[in-house]
Image: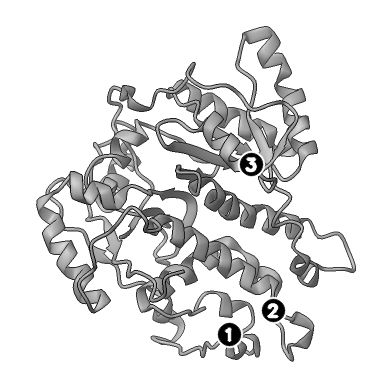
Amino acid sequence: RFCSARLPFASRSTMSAAFQSVGQLSPLPREALDIAAAGVPARVAKTRGYRGELILFTADENMAGWGFHFVNQLRRRGHEHWLIMADSADNCAGMHAQWEKMVSSYSEAPLSCAYSSYPKQHSGWAQWTRANHPDKMHQVYIFWATRWWVSLKLMREGLNILSLDVDAVLLGDIYSRLHSPPMVHQDVIITRNDDGSQSLNCGFVYFNRGASRARREQPSTYLTATNTEVDSHCGERARPESAADVPAAEWVCELMWERLRLFLEVDRVALRDSPKREVLWEQDAWNDLVKSLELRRRVFPWATGYGRQSDLWAALGYERVVVGGRKHAEKFVAWRKLKHERSPPFGAPDEPPYARRFFESSLETPLLWLPLCSPPNSS
């Protein structure tokens, strides 16, 4: 099950003690670890994971203030089970140097920062850069793509991953919501922009490896109806799940990374009309992936906007068919509305009136969900 939710306000309730990890974990070594190195994902998971959870966010020394603010707010919420993902060992070192005063003068715990040399080392990036002048955005696209590969590596070590952008603010106990129905029953949770575009926003993505277990062990009356919808959508009754199965959250994350890798491994020079390099933007990749999960075939309705006439799409087996003219309804996902007795599980905010309007117009509407069908092969 794939759930789309708008960015939630939360009531200022007492924080649950279940995921209060401050004081319970050790920092990573100051010399940055490379996630791509053998044994490092397991080491990171053991050192920084807590009760099967890890919060992942990106930062570098040039935006260290954003990262430091995020560390501060997570610790104030009681969460130490987080990892800063930088794009190089040097950037980790630069952030450590700037944070040193917090350690020496204010007794703050050291940072935990790591980087990954892969997929940055993939040779396919070179064909998408602008060779004639500096191209800072090229490095940003690599950085953004890397977090999904890193998420996948850490999930394979048994962790649920909450991936957040550092311009997010947690106004309540996020885990009390993620671990309660109906959220706990969803394999992947992602936010959707509230601008009418129906586009997804990957600034908040939660990969829940334990969703299928929660559906068995934390039953709810709404599950009977949604299980019927899943069976109907997927065309056959799902077989009983076993411990050997790959969690849906994990294979969705792998599909996300594979979608980006797809563009790295095409021969761009051989194309008659190549699309713009913005096809590497993670957000459009997420939108195309979820539409593909709905249709159960690979489609690119968002990415084609960067090169509508390109011969790449035919090479990838996709033919663009516009629905609804300029509205481009072919991009829209046919979300179901979650019929749950406690949906949504958010309290009304006590902020100014605009927050109340947002709550009433967005958060009081049913959560949106999409059935996930198992992949047709056993890989």
Instruction: Report the label total.
Output: 3
Question: What residue sits 18% from the left and 62% below the top?
Answer: 226
| Label 3, label 2: how far apart the Cα atoms are | 30 Å
Q: Quadrant of the N terminus?
A: bottom left
Q: Is residue 166 visible?
A: no
| Label of residue 266 in the image | 2
| Label 2, label 1: how far apart the Cα atoms are | 9 Å
Element type where label 1 sits in the image? loop
Q: Is mark 2 in CB contact (under 8 Å) with mark 1?
A: yes
User: Where is mark 3, residue-wise?
Assistant: 39
The residue lying toward the viewer, choosing from 196 and 199, is 199
The residue lying toward the viewer, choosing from 24 and 100, is 24
Amino acid type, residue under disc 3 in the picture = Gly
Q: Is residue 206 visible?
A: yes
Query: Which numbered disc, 3 or 1, marks the residue that appears first in the sequence?
Result: 3
Amino acid type, residue under disc 2 in the picture = Val
Q: Kindly report which numbered mark, 3 or 1, lies closer to the viewer in this rendering.
A: 3
Query: Which numbered disc, 2 or 1, marks the residue that appears first in the sequence?
Result: 2
Q: Based on the displayed image, in which of its 4 quarters is residue 180 positioned?
A: top left
Query: Which numbered disc, 3 or 2, marks the residue that appears first in the sequence?
Result: 3
Position of residue 300 in the picture relative to residue 238 (left or right): right
| Label 3, label 1: how far apart the Cα atoms are | 35 Å
User: Where is mark 1, residue-wise?
Assistant: 316
